Image (tube, rainbow, N blue to C red):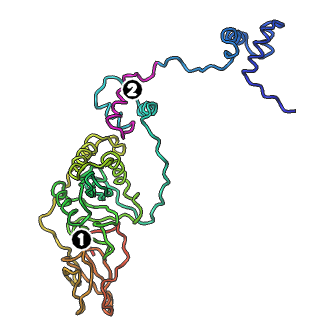
Amino acid sequence: MAWKLVLPMEERIRFVLAVEQREYSIAELCRHYGISRKTGYKWIGRYRAHGLEGMRERSRRPLRCPHATSQEWVDRIIQERLKHPRWGPKKIRVMLQEHGWPEPIPAASTIGTILDRAGAIKPRKRRRRPRRCLQGPLTQAQRSNHVWAVDYKGWFRTGDGQRCDPLTVSDLYSRYLLEIRALPNQRCAVAREVFDQLFRHYGLPEIIRTDNGTPFASTGAGGLSRLSVWWILLGIKLELIAPGHPEQNSIHERMHLTLKQEACHPAAATRKAQQRRFNRWRTEFNEQRPHEALDMKKPAQLYRRSHVSYPKTITEPSYPDGYQLRRVRTNGEIKWCGRTRFIGEALKGARLGLRRVDENRSQVYFGSILLGHLYDTDSGGLQPTAYYPQTYQTNQNV
């Protein structure tokens, strides 16, 4: 026979009803139900004061908490959140510290609880982690101007219908946002003007990391574009993330998400107005917003101008003895073995080095980059070779 389930409230009701019948003493009933006389008198008192509702279990939550956050602090936290709707508890706590309040500042977890109770936090959807690419690792930034990340955020139209292509450049070590430029298109000449100004103001980085889109890369020889060829001639190394793997540039892409949320919705009335909005947001991002990855410091506190100045003249790549030198013509061709051979329009004007491998084949280099092969028996152009974009280098040890 199965045991019967007995609920505590039912037992209390039986106990107080038995007390009211007065057939047994309270002491005998307490022994029968296995409770102390103190507990018995407690439930009798509640029954006589509140009836059967008094038999329910009451909350043991204290009426007041001496350690509760004061309403004054709650108001300060909410006000700070209203100023920065996208900032989390850790960033808000840093801002409260900078205000110099004399009282102890609530912990980040407490601030998070206050924001949650106020309905100021919306839960995020969990995202599936993307599969990792099997290509080699990218460079880990160790100092300012070690690695710059470059990308377009994604175009949109301003209120007057104009196209806006935001070009963004950031220093991956300090998270310092070097530039956000609202451009009309993604053409190489337009982007080059921006980088010409950046290099004059900040100096040159050691490495520039981009995706495989225009104007940073191409499907031509070595995956190079006119813009990336110019970078290489300046002595900058190139890194390309694997196609379809934006998570390899996660620091820069995360900045894009915040930029989109805080400075692009809704779009400004004109491209000039959008640029002014970008400038204000960039100042806040660099000089006011604490970053958890930087131990809650601001990017402007860590970034330093590059010690490599923008050169007035470009030094062409040199090649070891025995290499045949050729200059790429304006149509992307060179003269080799009595015939014109197409190399690529991105390299027009560049000096290439050709090394004879065997009787029929020659390797074509641009600096230390192996672009491909030319075959004497083939009247066609360059035969590209396999390459790993993230390992491009510009040292001259070919």
Q: Amino acid at mark 2?
A: Val
Residue drawn at (39%, 26%), measured in percent from left and top? 74
Q: To which residue does mark 2 refer?
A: 74
**Viewer can see residue 183:** yes
Side (left or right) of 286 relative to 125: left
SS category of the residue bearing label 2 = helix
Q: Amino acid at mark 1?
A: Arg
In the picture shown, does residue 222 fall above or below 378? above
Residue drawn at (24%, 66%), measured in percent from left and top? 187
In the picture shown, does residue 109 fall above or below 29? below
The quarter of the displayed image where residue 225 is located? bottom left
**Viewer can see residue 301:** no
The residue furthest left is 312
Q: Nearer the viewer, residue 119 or 29?
A: 119
Give the magenta part as a residue range.
66-89
For the C terminus, the quadrant is bottom left
SS category of the residue bearing label 1 = helix
Label disc, if present, on residue 12 of the rendered structure: none
Residue 360 lies, in percent from the top left, at 33, 91
Magenta stretch holds residue 243: no
The quarter of the displayed image where residue 151 is located? bottom left
Q: Are marks 1 and 2 in contact (CB under 8 Å)?
A: no
Q: Earlier in the sequence, mark 1 or mark 2?
A: 2
Q: Residues within 10 Å of mark 2 (few under 14, many from 20)?
A: some
Label disc, if present, on residue 226 of the rendered structure: 1
